[in-house]
Amino acid sequence: MLIKYKSSYEKISMGLLAFMPEEKNVKKLQQKIKKYEEDPRWQLYLWKEDEDIVGIVGVSLLEDDTVQLNHISVNPSFREEGIGKEMISALQEIYNGKLVPSVQTALFFAKCDSDNCE
Ligand SMILES: CC(C)(COP(=O)(O)OP(=O)(O)OC[C@H]1O[C@@H](n2cnc3c(N)ncnc32)[C@H](O)[C@@H]1OP(=O)(O)O)[C@@H](O)C(=O)NCCC(=O)NCCS
């Protein structure tokens, strides 16, 4: 189940975002979280599986009305169970199919597309 980020999830969110290959710098990670907290065009969601938070996706609303997937990450213990694809499907539903990838999420986004995970 996709749930909206709130500040009490900051630490778990940092941990999940740190699995993104380009998000290894702690200072930069903190700045990204701040951006998601403060900019209404940036939205962060967490994936809850039973009582565990095991995944994260972050999007930003672009000028042309599309919604860019900036971040997607799943706790390694829960990978290969379809959670990444489920998160993209849930976002496509929220944003009426207007989700587009960023450079950083393009590979998995394309994988999802080719598997018809919408
Ligand atoms: C990418 C990620 C979110 C996928 O999560 P997941 O829950 O394991 O994904 P799913 O179980 O829904 O899908 C697994 C499928 O995606 C493929 N896959 C995993 N990571 C991939 C990637 N970076 N690019 C393309 N395909 C990928 C797997 O090989 C698997 O393929 P299969 O269905 O043919 O066996 C997860 O591997 C992760 O957190 N990676 C680290 C963060 C990251 O690199 N994010 C950017 C990705 S472009």
Image (cartoon, rainbow, N blue to C red):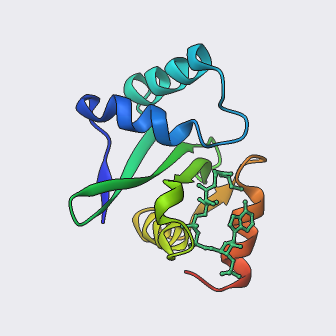
Which residue is found at the position 39% from the left and 55% from the top? 54
Examine the rendered structure and indicate whether residue 43 appears above or below residue 67.
above
- Give the total of numbered labels: 0
Examine the rendered structure and indicate whether residue 47 appears above or below residue 103.
below
Query: Is any part of residue 41 visible from this angle?
Result: no
- The picture places residue 113, in percent across and down from the top left corner, at 69, 77
Examine the rendered structure and indicate whether residue 19 appears above or below residue 75.
above
- The picture places residue 108, in percent across and down from the top left corner, at 70, 64
Q: In the image, is 34 to the left or to the right of 100?
A: left
Quick check: which quadrant has ligand 1? Answer: bottom right
Q: In the image, is 15 to the left or to the right of 117?
A: left
Front residue of 76 and 41? 76
Front residue of 65 and 90? 90
- The picture places residue 102, in percent across and down from the top left corner, at 72, 48
Quadrant location, the N terminus: bottom left
Which residue is found at the position 46% from the left and 32% from the top? 14
Front residue of 49 and 89? 49
Which residue is found at the position 65% from the left and 31% from the top? 23
Q: In the image, is 29 to the left or to the right of 3?
A: right
